[in-house]
Amino acid sequence: MTEDSPGAQPQTSSGADAPEIDRSIYRYVLRYTLRGQLFLLLLTVLTMPLVYISLDIPKRIINQAIGGVDMPDQILGFGVDQVSYLLALSVAFLLVVVISGALKFYLNVYKGVLGERMLRRFRFDLYTRILRFPSAHIRRTTPAEIIPMITAETEPLGGLIGDAIAAPAFQGALLLTYLSFIFQQDLWLGLASIALYPPQMYLIPKLQAKVNALAKTRVQTVRLLAGHIGETVQGATDIHANDSGRFERAKTSNQLGRIFDIREELYRRKFFIKFLNNILAQVTPFFFFSIGGYLVIQGDVSLGALVAVLAAYKDIGPPWKELLKFYQVFEDTRVKYEQVAKQFEPENMIKASILEDQEVVESLKGTLTASNVSYGEDENSQTVSGASFSLPLDTHVAVVGGAGSGKSHLAGLAARVLWPTAGRLSINDLDWSEVPEAVPGRRVAWVGSSAHIFSGTISHNLYYGLMNSPQNLDPKTEDKAEQRRLREALASGNSTDSAAMPWLDLAAGNLSDERALLEKAIKVLAVVQLDEDGYRFGLGMHATFSDQDGMRARFLKAREQIRAKGLEFVAFDPDIYNVNITVAENILFGNPDDPAFYPDRLPSNPLVTQLLRDAGLFDDFLAMGHKVAATMVEIFSGVSADSELFEQFSLVSSDDLVVLERILRDTTDAAVSDLAQLQEADQEILRALVYRLAPARHRLGIIDESVQQRLLKVRGMLRDELGSDNDSVNFLDAQAFNPGLNIESNVLFGAMPFGKPAVRETICREIDEAITAAGLREYVIELGLTADVGNAGGRLSSIQRQKLVIARALMKDPDLLVVDEALGPLDFNARSQIIKNVCEFMNGRGVLWVLETPALAREFEDVIVMGSGRILEQGKSEALEQQDGPFKALLTN
């Protein structure tokens, strides 16, 4: 059910050129769905004769087939008697009902599809407009306000859009059909049926206007509450630090109270309208029974006609109520639509033409020139005032100044993330404010003081600046699913680009292939001193490979080098119990592929349970678990539930303690005979504690030498039972690379010792040397790039986030790099070294760097000194340092 002809080949669109949103919901609907609405009207017209026929046939059945009056002698040339005529009319009635129902089914589905397409278009248009918001408006708007507008507040539009014309047309046509049938039976009955419509049509719009005003106020109040909740989430730490929770709760309570008052008034007014409709609707049957009964008695109307009229009036109620309901829903939705559309039309929006796609972007050469440029986020303040400068795109310039000097906004103007409110920025006479976003987006790199990290991997963020060349499938593809995706995207006015396809524009980064991309990524990470972090991330990753490059042999070579260093005491050995890993891991001595063999599920694994019985450990595990439980309750008694001790000990949680205390109360002593009386679930809980024990970490003295030897026996029995080649456990093998172990554990083929930091440091150093000697360091960094950064980079430190953003900028090979105090979290020496590295990387290309520390300006050729929004001084850094002036004053202070 699409508006496109099946044979039509889809065109393509990125959706960046979405037109303005109409303030009128009907204009917006008709602009995009006129063809579909007309088709719905056609379907509606086709159903009306069937509705009329469905009303007329029962009358004929009563008067003619059953009453025997005016019955035809034949139908379609076939003779009929009273019974056959009754059967023919009954079959005809059933057939009409089925056809009418099928048409209604198709009509409803089509309405749903039409509505969802428009809802998809509207949400996409709103999202596209977010990308056009001026930065000042973005700073004043919270995500908690914007997100519900695009998601929750637009949801009712889907149902309304499909019904915008079809519902009133269909219900109105039904109503007219029923009324025409009634008028055909008798004029007075017809007049009686519509007598109360005029009062309703006059009163309801006036009452609804009050409801609309309340609905508008409710929407605005809910948005204020959403903003307050978002602010609470972001400022939770400060709320706790200032003990202001009571005040914030009071604010929330007041806002909720305001919403309650509005909704209470809404309910009163909405249900009064419903009450009025119901009362008026029940008055009309009085006229039918009184006037209609009188007419039947007088012989002016047949009983069959009156019954048909009553049946028709019974059917009049639903369409009339649906029309009134549609009017109320439409008015409520119209208010929401207008409120949402208004919020997405801030002043000074970025022109839609700026966002238009540009396939080829030439390198920038020449000079960035500012002529009397000013910038302010409101009429009363200007953070940049009358700034003029020239920046050749092969020089490196530092921008310094105190707080409020306007230096950050000057950098934003140069990078075109801000637009001047006065003056002109240009590159070789090309107006910098008018060029498509593709030009600064691909040829200029911007790094702010708190740049955003996107959810995903390190590589996704590192290559993000190159993701502007979608490798879409041919629009003429024979893939049915892809054809449908393209058609629906076009029908909904969405982007036809597929996010699942490759997007990297290697040519933009002067790269020949993905190998060159990786080499450049490693180089850039080294420039910003993030390569070591990437390497550490890689050590914790798991790897699978086809071994085309002999990777397994190289890893085994690194492992042998570690063994040669005398680190057998941490190594995995099938004949030695490893005290640095848990009992469960020692029993498995491998990595489980079958969930039934996951360490936390071993206590309930039937095979492992039987092996423990065979080794005489099953009852001992119960007694040992009881001892562990008693020790844990004793150690953690009185410790707060959020204490870090639980995580450090990594054996029980605060919730576990409650269960363990109950189990201990149920047992008088630790005798196996007494413990065996516990429920099976409680016994399993106690045994599970033993599975979690790591002797070197927990040091409880429970897993002694004797127990370790018996556990080694269980290990061997498990290997014999499953066999070396099985689908349940991938057993550890010193001569094989194990994908279940991370890189570090594969090279070490052992477990890091607990509580010995000096030994751990030595082992890490040996691992690093072995990996480097085997030529695996680059591969490990490549794996590190696949590490997940968490939501907004939450798994990275602030230093790592800023370094990653600078690396992302350098990956574009920009003609101009603009940095705004991006090294704030680093110390002076680290900042200095990264600046040197970046400037060397950007040799021959432009750099504009807003510095946190004026002394770092010595690393740059030229300096711009800002103060109170104006350029106070500019020139060569060495010359400015020698003369008395603002720059020298900054250095001195």
Image (cartoon, rainbow, N blue to C red):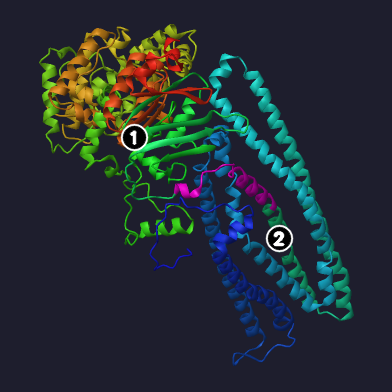
Say which amino acid is labelled 2.
Leu
- In the drawing, does residue 435 fall left or right of residue 523? right
Q: Closer to the observer: label 2 or label 1?
A: 1
Can the viewer see residue 609 in this picture?
Answer: no
Neighbor class of circle 2 (other Cα within 10 Å; few <14, some 14-19, many 20+) is some
Q: Position of residue 774 (x, y in %)?
A: 13, 25
Quadrant containing the C terminus in the rendered view = top left
Say which amino acid is labelled 1.
Leu
Q: Which residues are magenta?
A: 331-355
The quarter of the displayed image where residue 787 is located? top left
Residue 323 numbered tag: 2
Can the viewer see residue 584 in this picture?
Answer: yes
The quarter of the displayed image where residue 563 is located? top left
Q: Position of residue 65 (x, y in %)?
A: 69, 82
In front of the other: 120 or 382: 382
- In the drawing, does residue 297 fall left or right of residue 745? right
Q: Residue at x 80, y 77 (%)?
A: 303
Q: Position of residue 438 (x, y in %)?
A: 39, 45
Residue 393 numbered tag: 1
